[in-house]
Amino acid sequence: MVMVMEPVAAGNNGIPVRMHGYEFGKAECMAPRARLGILFLMQIMGLLYTKVLYRLFGGYVSDVVAAIEQAVQDGVDVINLSVGPNSPPSTTKTTFLNPFDAALLSAVKAGVFVAQAAGNGGPFPKTLVSFSPWITTVAAAVDDRRYKNHMVLGNGKELPGLGLSPSTHANKSFNLVSASDALLDSSVMKYNPLDCQRPELLNKNLVEGRILLCGYSFNFVSGTASVKKVSETAQSLGAAGFVVAVENSYPGTKYDPVPVAIPGILITDVGMTKELIEYYNCSTKRDWAGRPLEFQATASIADDVKDFSFEDADVLKPDILAPGSLIWAAWAPNGTDDANYLGEWFAMASGTSMAAPHIAGIAALVKQKHPQWSPSAIKSALMTTANTLDRSGRPLQAQQYSGSEIMTLSLQPRSTMEAGKSTQKLPSIQDSF
């Protein structure tokens, strides 16, 4: 049995990922015949677990420790943890002997393999949230899968972006209309209509048959706005497609493509957004009061449906790397963690929380093949047989954040880590962790 926090470690293979009438390949989990125990559910496979983590609140270490101990008593073979402390301890410099890591040490001593997400704060020093030597710490790898898209403006300029959508009609461009120019009443600005979340605020006569231009505000970062809702707004107004343009950078924000049923694209480069807005403004005729008279800007959308003061933990971490970028994972249709995938059976997520269950599932397969092997033996087998080169034969390197969409790679020194205490909150399972 595998104790999991993500629907990636175990499950069937060859399952088609279908959304909006399109198929995005087939999903496969690591250990197809493993039985699962889920920390979030009350009862799985006849075993009783208390719900310990919640979407907005997170949870407490003490509750997670109790769940881990219960899982060990129930005889699980592998525990995957896509969670960890969200801040270092404030009353001690001891990095290992906190209740959370001590409980995991007990689990390992009882023969349970533990895989934990490294966290997504790196690759800088002291950013890992899984540091103890008895835990298999998993970093997230970026693979060669990309869901990049582009739109072509009427002036011939091609703007790159992200998209998982059909294209506008071949060899045909459509007029652009900004949400700010399609407002029914300027007094509704309190609803931030530029997010295009409320179709009743926009003039259907102006939007219909055109590409709706929307703005990416902080509401998208906070989760109160979603690209999926933009697509629903555009579709209900009869738009030919939509564009969501990022005008202001939000440090640390992940921009992932969202599957939608109509042509759509997310422009994440602020420079490209500036060019788009300049072209739109220059091509839109207005009266003396600034009201639009004629929308002459056109575009088409391509398709792409396919410093802490604590002592350092002197341990070389992470232990291993696994796929963690743009991972299709099984999803509860009534789940509310991400509004973009409400009602869907699959969701695309990124982060070390998606990488750790890959290792947990592989560990379950090794355990099945070698039931007498200890967790350390399984960990050693995985680490000593893992690739150290990418597909082009070059050494695997760490990804560095930059202000643009271009990511640089560099070889990194070892990272260090701090831990949490028993009253410390743990974040709930999420894409960013």
Image (tube, rainbow, N blue to C red):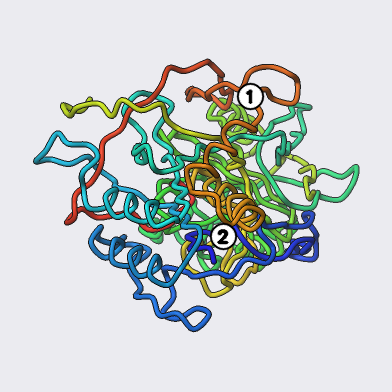
Q: Position of residue 392 (x, y in %)?
A: 75, 20
State the residue position of label 2: 340
| Amino acid, disc 1 | Thr
**For residue 304, above or below residue 182:** above
State the residue position of label 1: 388
**For residue 130, above or below residue 24:** above
Q: Residue at x 56, y 68 (%)?
A: 342
Q: Position of residue 412 (x, y in %)?
A: 47, 18
Please indicate, yes or no, whether residue 26 appears anywhere in the rendered image: yes
Q: Position of residue 192 (x, y in %)?
A: 42, 55
In the displayed structure, does residue 11 sit left or right of residue 312?
Answer: right
Q: Earlier in the sequence, mark 1 or mark 2?
A: 2
Dot 2: what SS?
helix
Residue furthest to the left:
91
Q: Position of residue 293 (x, y in %)?
A: 63, 46
Of marks 1 and 2, the one in the foreground? 1
* Residue in front for this viewpoint, 356 or 101: 101
Q: How many other residues sit within 10 Å of disc 1, few (<14), some (14-19) or many (≥20)?
A: some
| Amino acid, disc 2 | Asn
**For residue 49, above or below residue 349:** below
Dot 1: what SS?
loop
